[in-house]
Amino acid sequence: MTDQPSHLFYQSRNPRPFLDRGEGIYLFDQSGKRYIDGSSGAMVSNIGHSNPRVLAKMKAQMDKATFGYRLHFRTEASENLAAKTAQMMPEGLDRVFFVSGGSEAVESAVKLARQYKITQGEDSRWKVISRFPSYHGCTLGALDLTGYDPLTQPFAPMMRGMPKIPAPATYLDRDNLTEHERGLKYAEMLRDKIVAEGPDTVLAFIMEPVGGASTGALVAPDSYYGRIREICDEFGVLLIYDEVMTGVGRTGRFLAAEHWGIIPDIVAMSKGFGSGYAPLGATVAGSRIVEPILDAGGFQHGFTYAGNPMACSAGLAVLEEIESEGLVANAAAMGDVLIARMQGLMARYPFIGDVRGKGLLTAFEFVSDRDTMEPLPVGLNAFSQLVERAYERGLIIYSRRTRGGAAGDHFLLAPPLIITEAQIDEMMSILTDSLDAFAA
Ligand code: PMP
Protein backbone atom coordinates (compact mmCIF):
# COMPACT_ATOMS: atom_id res chain seq x y z
CA MET A 1 0.00 0.00 0.00
CA THR A 2 1.19 3.52 -0.70
CA ASP A 3 1.55 6.24 1.92
CA GLN A 4 -1.86 7.76 1.31
CA PRO A 5 -3.37 9.85 4.16
CA SER A 6 -5.00 7.66 6.80
CA HIS A 7 -8.64 7.99 7.81
CA LEU A 8 -8.01 5.96 10.96
CA PHE A 9 -7.38 7.40 14.35
CA TYR A 10 -6.11 5.58 17.42
CA GLN A 11 -4.07 6.89 20.38
CA SER A 12 -1.81 8.79 18.00
CA ARG A 13 -0.85 8.99 14.35
CA ASN A 14 0.52 5.63 13.30
CA PRO A 15 3.94 5.67 11.64
CA ARG A 16 4.34 1.87 11.58
CA PRO A 17 4.81 -0.10 8.36
CA PHE A 18 1.98 -2.13 6.85
CA LEU A 19 1.66 -5.71 8.10
CA ASP A 20 1.87 -8.34 5.40
CA ARG A 21 1.75 -11.78 6.99
CA GLY A 22 2.48 -13.86 10.07
CA GLU A 23 4.13 -17.21 10.55
CA GLY A 24 4.64 -18.78 13.99
CA ILE A 25 6.50 -16.30 16.22
CA TYR A 26 7.29 -14.05 13.24
CA LEU A 27 5.51 -11.16 11.51
CA PHE A 28 6.52 -9.68 8.15
CA ASP A 29 5.86 -6.17 6.86
CA GLN A 30 5.12 -5.37 3.22
CA SER A 31 8.79 -4.69 2.48
CA GLY A 32 9.53 -8.28 3.51
CA LYS A 33 11.25 -7.30 6.77
CA ARG A 34 10.85 -9.95 9.47
CA TYR A 35 10.06 -9.24 13.14
CA ILE A 36 10.07 -11.57 16.12
CA ASP A 37 6.75 -10.97 17.88
CA GLY A 38 8.40 -10.76 21.31
CA SER A 39 5.22 -9.55 23.01
CA SER A 40 2.64 -11.63 21.08
CA GLY A 41 1.18 -8.27 20.03
CA ALA A 42 -0.29 -7.10 23.32
CA MET A 43 0.14 -10.56 24.94
CA VAL A 44 -2.48 -11.96 22.56
CA SER A 45 -1.00 -14.40 20.03
CA ASN A 46 -0.37 -17.30 22.42
CA ILE A 47 -0.32 -20.03 19.76
CA GLY A 48 1.61 -17.96 17.19
CA HIS A 49 0.53 -16.60 13.83
CA SER A 50 -1.23 -18.29 10.89
CA ASN A 51 -1.53 -21.73 12.43
CA PRO A 52 -2.86 -23.85 9.53
CA ARG A 53 -4.92 -26.22 11.72
CA VAL A 54 -6.73 -23.32 13.34
CA LEU A 55 -7.35 -21.63 10.00
CA ALA A 56 -8.77 -24.86 8.56
CA LYS A 57 -11.23 -25.22 11.46
CA MET A 58 -12.29 -21.59 11.12
CA LYS A 59 -12.82 -22.04 7.38
CA ALA A 60 -14.98 -25.10 7.99
CA GLN A 61 -17.21 -22.99 10.26
CA MET A 62 -17.19 -20.11 7.77
CA ASP A 63 -18.46 -22.38 5.02
CA LYS A 64 -21.48 -23.36 7.18
CA ALA A 65 -22.60 -20.18 8.97
CA THR A 66 -20.78 -17.05 10.13
CA PHE A 67 -23.51 -15.74 12.40
CA GLY A 68 -26.61 -16.83 14.20
CA TYR A 69 -27.85 -14.69 17.05
CA ARG A 70 -27.44 -16.57 20.31
CA LEU A 71 -31.04 -15.97 21.40
CA HIS A 72 -32.27 -17.47 18.11
CA PHE A 73 -30.00 -20.52 17.90
CA ARG A 74 -27.59 -22.56 19.96
CA THR A 75 -24.39 -23.29 18.06
CA GLU A 76 -22.10 -26.29 18.30
CA ALA A 77 -19.11 -23.93 18.20
CA SER A 78 -20.14 -22.05 21.35
CA GLU A 79 -21.36 -25.15 23.23
CA ASN A 80 -18.16 -27.04 22.43
CA LEU A 81 -15.93 -24.11 23.34
CA ALA A 82 -17.75 -23.65 26.66
CA ALA A 83 -17.31 -27.36 27.42
CA LYS A 84 -13.64 -27.31 26.48
CA THR A 85 -13.06 -24.17 28.56
CA ALA A 86 -14.73 -25.77 31.58
CA GLN A 87 -12.56 -28.87 31.14
CA MET A 88 -9.33 -26.85 31.08
CA MET A 89 -10.24 -24.51 33.96
CA PRO A 90 -9.65 -25.39 37.63
CA GLU A 91 -12.40 -27.50 39.24
CA GLY A 92 -15.71 -25.72 39.72
CA LEU A 93 -15.18 -22.91 37.21
CA ASP A 94 -17.46 -24.44 34.64
CA ARG A 95 -20.08 -21.88 33.60
CA VAL A 96 -19.04 -19.71 30.69
CA PHE A 97 -20.35 -16.40 29.32
CA PHE A 98 -18.74 -15.31 26.03
CA VAL A 99 -17.74 -11.75 25.15
CA SER A 100 -15.51 -10.18 22.51
CA GLY A 101 -12.65 -8.72 24.55
CA GLY A 102 -11.01 -8.10 27.91
CA SER A 103 -12.87 -4.96 28.99
CA GLU A 104 -16.16 -6.72 28.23
CA ALA A 105 -15.03 -9.75 30.25
CA VAL A 106 -14.21 -7.54 33.26
CA GLU A 107 -17.47 -5.62 33.09
CA SER A 108 -19.42 -8.86 32.73
CA ALA A 109 -17.65 -10.22 35.82
CA VAL A 110 -18.67 -7.18 37.87
CA LYS A 111 -22.27 -7.29 36.68
CA LEU A 112 -22.41 -11.04 37.36
CA ALA A 113 -21.11 -10.44 40.88
CA ARG A 114 -23.69 -7.70 41.44
CA GLN A 115 -26.62 -9.76 40.22
CA TYR A 116 -25.51 -12.74 42.32
CA LYS A 117 -25.39 -10.64 45.48
CA ILE A 118 -28.87 -9.29 44.71
CA THR A 119 -30.18 -12.86 44.58
CA GLN A 120 -28.67 -13.32 48.04
CA GLY A 121 -30.54 -10.27 49.35
CA GLU A 122 -27.31 -8.26 49.60
CA ASP A 123 -28.32 -5.32 47.40
CA SER A 124 -26.23 -2.89 49.43
CA ARG A 125 -23.01 -4.28 48.00
CA TRP A 126 -21.77 -2.36 44.97
CA LYS A 127 -18.16 -1.27 45.54
CA VAL A 128 -15.44 -3.15 43.72
CA ILE A 129 -12.03 -2.71 45.30
CA SER A 130 -9.09 -2.87 42.90
CA ARG A 131 -5.38 -2.11 43.05
CA PHE A 132 -3.10 0.77 42.19
CA PRO A 133 -1.47 0.50 39.71
CA SER A 134 -3.54 -1.88 37.63
CA TYR A 135 -5.14 -2.22 34.23
CA HIS A 136 -8.60 -3.69 33.76
CA GLY A 137 -9.79 -2.14 30.50
CA CYS A 138 -10.84 1.03 28.74
CA THR A 139 -14.65 1.01 28.86
CA LEU A 140 -15.94 3.34 31.59
CA GLY A 141 -16.76 0.60 34.11
CA ALA A 142 -13.48 -1.27 33.63
CA LEU A 143 -11.61 2.03 33.57
CA ASP A 144 -13.07 2.86 36.98
CA LEU A 145 -11.30 -0.23 38.31
CA THR A 146 -8.05 0.65 36.54
CA GLY A 147 -5.35 2.24 38.67
CA TYR A 148 -3.41 4.36 36.22
CA ASP A 149 -3.93 8.13 36.36
CA PRO A 150 -3.05 9.14 32.78
CA LEU A 151 -5.82 6.87 31.51
CA THR A 152 -8.42 7.56 34.19
CA GLN A 153 -8.03 11.27 35.00
CA PRO A 154 -9.32 12.68 31.69
CA PHE A 155 -12.63 10.89 32.34
CA ALA A 156 -12.74 11.38 36.12
CA PRO A 157 -16.20 12.89 36.68
CA MET A 158 -17.75 10.13 34.58
CA MET A 159 -16.66 7.41 36.99
CA ARG A 160 -17.54 6.62 40.60
CA GLY A 161 -13.91 6.41 41.77
CA MET A 162 -13.87 2.83 43.07
CA PRO A 163 -11.68 2.23 46.17
CA LYS A 164 -8.11 1.04 45.55
CA ILE A 165 -5.28 -0.56 47.53
CA PRO A 166 -1.59 -0.62 46.53
CA ALA A 167 -0.41 -3.45 44.29
CA PRO A 168 2.32 -5.37 46.14
CA ALA A 169 5.44 -4.00 44.44
CA THR A 170 7.65 -5.54 47.12
CA TYR A 171 10.80 -5.28 44.99
CA LEU A 172 10.70 -1.56 45.78
CA ASP A 173 10.33 -2.03 49.54
CA ARG A 174 13.36 -1.27 51.70
CA ASP A 175 12.02 -2.56 55.02
CA ASN A 176 13.36 -5.41 57.14
CA LEU A 177 10.46 -7.75 56.45
CA THR A 178 10.77 -11.13 54.73
CA GLU A 179 8.96 -11.60 51.42
CA HIS A 180 6.41 -13.77 53.24
CA GLU A 181 5.71 -10.96 55.71
CA ARG A 182 5.49 -8.40 52.94
CA GLY A 183 2.92 -10.51 51.12
CA LEU A 184 0.77 -10.59 54.25
CA LYS A 185 1.29 -6.87 54.83
CA TYR A 186 -0.10 -6.00 51.39
CA ALA A 187 -2.98 -8.46 51.75
CA GLU A 188 -3.99 -6.85 55.06
CA MET A 189 -4.45 -3.59 53.14
CA LEU A 190 -7.48 -5.23 51.53
CA ARG A 191 -8.89 -6.13 54.94
CA ASP A 192 -8.36 -2.56 56.17
CA LYS A 193 -10.01 -1.17 53.04
CA ILE A 194 -13.06 -3.43 53.32
CA VAL A 195 -13.49 -2.45 56.97
CA ALA A 196 -13.07 1.25 56.17
CA GLU A 197 -15.56 1.15 53.29
CA GLY A 198 -18.08 -0.88 55.31
CA PRO A 199 -18.17 -4.60 54.50
CA ASP A 200 -21.85 -4.57 53.57
CA THR A 201 -21.09 -2.11 50.75
CA VAL A 202 -18.26 -4.13 49.21
CA LEU A 203 -19.22 -6.38 46.30
CA ALA A 204 -15.90 -7.69 45.03
CA PHE A 205 -12.13 -7.39 44.85
CA ILE A 206 -10.50 -7.59 41.43
CA MET A 207 -6.81 -8.29 40.78
CA GLU A 208 -4.44 -9.35 38.05
CA PRO A 209 -2.66 -12.39 39.57
CA VAL A 210 0.48 -11.41 37.68
CA GLY A 211 0.52 -7.76 36.68
CA GLY A 212 0.49 -6.83 33.04
CA ALA A 213 0.46 -3.53 31.23
CA SER A 214 0.53 -1.42 34.39
CA THR A 215 3.09 -3.10 36.61
CA GLY A 216 5.16 -5.16 34.18
CA ALA A 217 4.79 -8.83 35.13
CA LEU A 218 4.66 -8.04 38.84
CA VAL A 219 4.36 -11.21 40.92
CA ALA A 220 3.32 -10.90 44.58
CA PRO A 221 4.93 -12.97 47.36
CA ASP A 222 3.26 -16.40 47.63
CA SER A 223 1.72 -15.52 50.99
CA TYR A 224 -0.34 -12.73 49.39
CA TYR A 225 -2.62 -14.93 47.31
CA GLY A 226 -3.98 -17.24 50.01
CA ARG A 227 -4.47 -14.41 52.48
CA ILE A 228 -6.45 -12.37 49.94
CA ARG A 229 -8.75 -15.37 49.38
CA GLU A 230 -9.26 -15.70 53.16
CA ILE A 231 -10.06 -12.02 53.59
CA CYS A 232 -12.62 -12.10 50.77
CA ASP A 233 -14.26 -15.15 52.35
CA GLU A 234 -14.29 -13.54 55.79
CA PHE A 235 -16.39 -10.62 54.50
CA GLY A 236 -18.40 -12.36 51.76
CA VAL A 237 -16.57 -10.28 49.14
CA LEU A 238 -16.36 -11.99 45.74
CA LEU A 239 -12.85 -12.53 44.40
CA ILE A 240 -12.52 -11.71 40.70
CA TYR A 241 -9.31 -12.68 38.92
CA ASP A 242 -8.61 -10.60 35.83
CA GLU A 243 -6.79 -13.25 33.78
CA VAL A 244 -7.30 -11.38 30.51
CA MET A 245 -3.53 -11.35 30.03
CA THR A 246 -2.37 -14.17 32.31
CA GLY A 247 -4.95 -16.81 31.31
CA VAL A 248 -4.81 -19.51 28.64
CA GLY A 249 -1.33 -20.77 29.45
CA ARG A 250 0.62 -17.52 29.41
CA THR A 251 2.23 -17.98 32.85
CA GLY A 252 2.90 -21.72 32.54
CA ARG A 253 -0.45 -22.84 33.98
CA PHE A 254 -3.79 -22.62 32.20
CA LEU A 255 -4.83 -19.97 34.74
CA ALA A 256 -2.24 -18.09 36.77
CA ALA A 257 -4.47 -18.75 39.83
CA GLU A 258 -3.31 -22.38 39.70
CA HIS A 259 0.23 -21.41 40.78
CA TRP A 260 -1.17 -20.69 44.23
CA GLY A 261 -4.07 -23.14 44.27
CA ILE A 262 -6.60 -20.29 44.37
CA ILE A 263 -10.12 -20.76 43.03
CA PRO A 264 -11.48 -17.27 42.32
CA ASP A 265 -15.25 -16.76 42.33
CA ILE A 266 -15.23 -15.23 38.86
CA VAL A 267 -12.52 -15.14 36.16
CA ALA A 268 -12.23 -12.74 33.21
CA MET A 269 -10.26 -13.98 30.18
CA SER A 270 -9.55 -12.74 26.67
CA LYS A 271 -6.35 -12.04 24.67
CA GLY A 272 -4.81 -15.55 24.37
CA PHE A 273 -8.30 -17.08 24.37
CA GLY A 274 -8.83 -15.94 20.77
CA SER A 275 -5.05 -15.82 20.32
CA GLY A 276 -5.37 -13.21 17.58
CA TYR A 277 -7.63 -15.40 15.41
CA ALA A 278 -10.82 -13.77 16.64
CA PRO A 279 -11.98 -11.13 19.12
CA LEU A 280 -13.01 -13.38 21.98
CA GLY A 281 -13.24 -13.31 25.74
CA ALA A 282 -15.09 -15.08 28.50
CA THR A 283 -16.37 -14.53 32.00
CA VAL A 284 -16.29 -17.80 33.90
CA ALA A 285 -17.82 -18.70 37.26
CA GLY A 286 -19.22 -21.70 39.10
CA SER A 287 -22.82 -22.90 39.29
CA ARG A 288 -23.04 -21.51 42.85
CA ILE A 289 -22.99 -18.01 41.33
CA VAL A 290 -24.76 -18.69 38.04
CA GLU A 291 -27.71 -20.91 39.05
CA PRO A 292 -29.38 -18.44 41.46
CA ILE A 293 -29.20 -15.78 38.73
CA LEU A 294 -30.81 -18.09 36.17
CA ASP A 295 -33.45 -19.04 38.74
CA ALA A 296 -34.19 -15.36 39.31
CA GLY A 297 -34.85 -14.71 35.61
CA GLY A 298 -31.41 -14.68 34.00
CA PHE A 299 -28.31 -12.55 33.64
CA GLN A 300 -29.46 -9.08 32.51
CA HIS A 301 -26.47 -8.58 30.27
CA GLY A 302 -25.17 -9.51 26.83
CA PHE A 303 -23.38 -8.27 23.74
CA THR A 304 -24.69 -8.74 20.20
CA TYR A 305 -21.60 -10.56 18.98
CA ALA A 306 -21.18 -12.63 22.14
CA GLY A 307 -20.59 -16.29 21.40
CA ASN A 308 -20.74 -15.89 17.64
CA PRO A 309 -19.78 -19.07 15.80
CA MET A 310 -16.75 -17.62 13.99
CA ALA A 311 -15.11 -16.44 17.21
CA CYS A 312 -16.03 -19.65 19.04
CA SER A 313 -14.70 -21.91 16.28
CA ALA A 314 -11.42 -19.99 16.52
CA GLY A 315 -11.38 -20.25 20.32
CA LEU A 316 -12.07 -23.98 20.24
CA ALA A 317 -9.30 -24.55 17.71
CA VAL A 318 -6.93 -22.47 19.87
CA LEU A 319 -7.66 -24.52 23.01
CA GLU A 320 -7.27 -27.77 21.05
CA GLU A 321 -3.92 -26.52 19.81
CA ILE A 322 -2.80 -25.58 23.32
CA GLU A 323 -3.73 -29.03 24.55
CA SER A 324 -2.37 -31.14 21.68
CA GLU A 325 0.92 -29.25 21.43
CA GLY A 326 1.51 -29.10 25.20
CA LEU A 327 1.85 -25.32 25.07
CA VAL A 328 1.15 -24.70 28.76
CA ALA A 329 4.09 -26.90 29.73
CA ASN A 330 6.21 -25.28 27.04
CA ALA A 331 5.39 -21.84 28.44
CA ALA A 332 6.59 -22.99 31.87
CA ALA A 333 9.82 -24.53 30.54
CA MET A 334 10.63 -21.72 28.09
CA GLY A 335 9.71 -19.13 30.73
CA ASP A 336 12.47 -20.52 32.96
CA VAL A 337 14.94 -20.33 30.07
CA LEU A 338 13.90 -16.77 29.23
CA ILE A 339 14.07 -15.47 32.81
CA ALA A 340 17.55 -17.00 33.23
CA ARG A 341 18.76 -15.33 30.01
CA MET A 342 17.26 -12.00 31.13
CA GLN A 343 18.91 -12.25 34.54
CA GLY A 344 22.18 -12.90 32.71
CA LEU A 345 21.87 -9.43 31.14
CA MET A 346 21.96 -7.72 34.54
CA ALA A 347 25.73 -8.11 34.86
CA ARG A 348 26.26 -6.34 31.54
CA TYR A 349 23.71 -3.53 31.85
CA PRO A 350 23.72 -1.76 35.23
CA PHE A 351 20.51 0.07 34.33
CA ILE A 352 18.49 -3.16 34.49
CA GLY A 353 17.13 -2.93 38.01
CA ASP A 354 14.76 -5.88 38.14
CA VAL A 355 13.89 -9.01 36.15
CA ARG A 356 10.62 -10.72 36.99
CA GLY A 357 7.67 -12.73 35.73
CA LYS A 358 5.99 -16.13 35.53
CA GLY A 359 6.14 -18.46 32.56
CA LEU A 360 6.23 -16.43 29.35
CA LEU A 361 4.96 -13.22 30.95
CA THR A 362 8.27 -11.59 31.87
CA ALA A 363 9.60 -8.08 32.28
CA PHE A 364 12.66 -6.06 33.10
CA GLU A 365 12.74 -2.61 34.57
CA PHE A 366 15.28 0.16 34.06
CA VAL A 367 16.62 2.20 36.98
CA SER A 368 19.34 4.79 37.48
CA ASP A 369 20.48 3.13 40.73
CA ARG A 370 19.95 -0.50 41.68
CA ASP A 371 20.28 0.12 45.41
CA THR A 372 17.68 2.84 45.65
CA MET A 373 15.71 1.63 42.56
CA GLU A 374 15.52 5.28 41.49
CA PRO A 375 13.93 5.30 38.00
CA LEU A 376 15.70 6.73 34.95
CA PRO A 377 14.89 10.39 34.27
CA VAL A 378 11.51 10.70 32.57
CA GLY A 379 12.98 12.94 29.85
CA LEU A 380 15.19 10.09 28.69
CA ASN A 381 12.12 8.28 27.37
CA ALA A 382 13.91 4.98 27.90
CA PHE A 383 10.68 3.04 27.44
CA SER A 384 10.22 4.23 23.87
CA GLN A 385 13.94 4.45 23.05
CA LEU A 386 14.54 0.75 23.60
CA VAL A 387 11.34 -0.25 21.84
CA GLU A 388 12.46 1.69 18.75
CA ARG A 389 16.01 0.26 18.80
CA ALA A 390 14.52 -3.24 18.97
CA TYR A 391 11.88 -2.54 16.31
CA GLU A 392 14.57 -1.35 13.87
CA ARG A 393 16.37 -4.65 14.45
CA GLY A 394 13.29 -6.78 13.97
CA LEU A 395 12.13 -7.44 17.53
CA ILE A 396 8.78 -6.29 18.96
CA ILE A 397 8.65 -5.66 22.71
CA TYR A 398 6.01 -3.96 24.84
CA SER A 399 6.87 -1.13 27.19
CA ARG A 400 5.21 1.16 29.72
CA ARG A 401 6.40 3.96 31.94
CA THR A 402 4.70 3.00 35.20
CA ARG A 403 5.66 1.08 38.29
CA GLY A 404 4.53 0.98 41.89
CA GLY A 405 2.42 4.07 41.21
CA ALA A 406 5.36 6.21 40.08
CA ALA A 407 7.07 6.70 36.74
CA GLY A 408 9.52 3.96 35.79
CA ASP A 409 10.40 2.19 32.56
CA HIS A 410 9.47 -1.46 32.22
CA PHE A 411 9.50 -3.79 29.24
CA LEU A 412 7.46 -6.93 28.75
CA LEU A 413 8.88 -9.92 26.91
CA ALA A 414 6.02 -12.31 26.25
CA PRO A 415 6.54 -14.27 23.04
CA PRO A 416 4.04 -16.84 21.72
CA LEU A 417 3.91 -20.01 23.84
CA ILE A 418 5.21 -22.05 20.87
CA ILE A 419 8.67 -20.48 21.12
CA THR A 420 11.71 -22.81 21.14
CA GLU A 421 14.99 -22.39 23.00
CA ALA A 422 16.80 -21.58 19.73
CA GLN A 423 14.24 -18.85 19.03
CA ILE A 424 14.72 -17.45 22.54
CA ASP A 425 18.45 -17.21 21.77
CA GLU A 426 17.65 -15.43 18.51
CA MET A 427 15.37 -13.01 20.37
CA MET A 428 17.97 -12.37 23.08
CA SER A 429 20.68 -11.66 20.53
CA ILE A 430 18.55 -8.93 18.90
CA LEU A 431 17.66 -7.64 22.35
CA THR A 432 21.34 -7.44 23.36
CA ASP A 433 22.16 -5.49 20.18
CA SER A 434 19.26 -3.16 20.97
CA LEU A 435 20.40 -2.70 24.58
CA ASP A 436 23.92 -1.88 23.32
CA ALA A 437 22.45 0.71 20.96
CA PHE A 438 20.32 2.12 23.78
CA ALA A 439 23.32 2.31 26.17
CA ALA A 440 25.56 3.98 23.57
N1 PMP B 1 -7.53 -6.68 31.77
C1 PMP B 1 -6.21 -6.85 31.60
C2 PMP B 1 -5.42 -7.49 32.69
C3 PMP B 1 -5.59 -6.45 30.40
O1 PMP B 1 -4.28 -6.62 30.26
C4 PMP B 1 -6.39 -5.87 29.39
C5 PMP B 1 -5.77 -5.41 28.08
N2 PMP B 1 -4.48 -4.96 28.14
C6 PMP B 1 -7.75 -5.71 29.61
C7 PMP B 1 -8.29 -6.13 30.81
C8 PMP B 1 -8.66 -5.10 28.57
O2 PMP B 1 -8.75 -5.92 27.46
P1 PMP B 1 -9.27 -5.34 26.05
O3 PMP B 1 -8.23 -4.38 25.57
O4 PMP B 1 -9.37 -6.57 25.19
O5 PMP B 1 -10.59 -4.72 26.27
Image (tube, grey):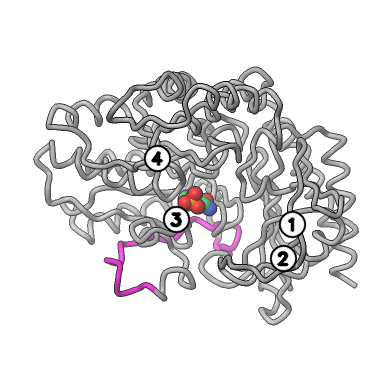
Answer whether residue 171 is magenta in the image: yes
Instruction: Name the residue beneath numbered marker 4.
Output: 305
Ligand 1 within 8 A of label 3's CB? yes
Q: Upstream in the sequence, badge 4 or badge 1?
A: 1
> Between 375 and 231, which is closer to the camera in this rendering?
375
Which mark is drawn over residue 366? 2
Query: Quick check: 377 above or below 163?
Result: below
Q: Which mark is residue 137?
A: 3
Question: At 66% from the left edge and 33% from the top edge, which residue is drawn?
Answer: 47
Kindly report the distance in space between the C-alpha atoms of the residues bearing marks 1 and 3: 26 Å
10 Å crowding of disc 4: few (<14), some (14-19), many (20+): some
Badge 2 density bin: few <14, some 14–19, many ≥20, Cα 10 Å:
many
Type of the residue with mark 4 = Tyr
Q: Is residue 182 above or below residue 105?
A: below
Q: Residue at x 56, y 52 (%)?
A: 212
The answer to whether 252 appears left or right of 148 in the picture is right
**Would residue 226 appear left or right of 397 to someone viewing this image?**
left
Q: Does the residue labelled 4 lie within 8 Å of ligand 1?
A: no
Q: Report the Cα–Cα distance between label 2 and label 1.
A: 30 Å
- Residue 284: image quadrant is top left
CA distance for labels 4 and 1: 28 Å
Name the foreground residue: 337 vs 190.
337
Is the Cβ of the residue at disc 1 closer than 8 Å to that at disc 3? no
Kind of residue sitting beneath label 3:
Gly
Bounds of the magenta segment: 155-175
Secondary structure category for the residue under label 1: loop
Q: Residue 18 carries which label?
A: 1
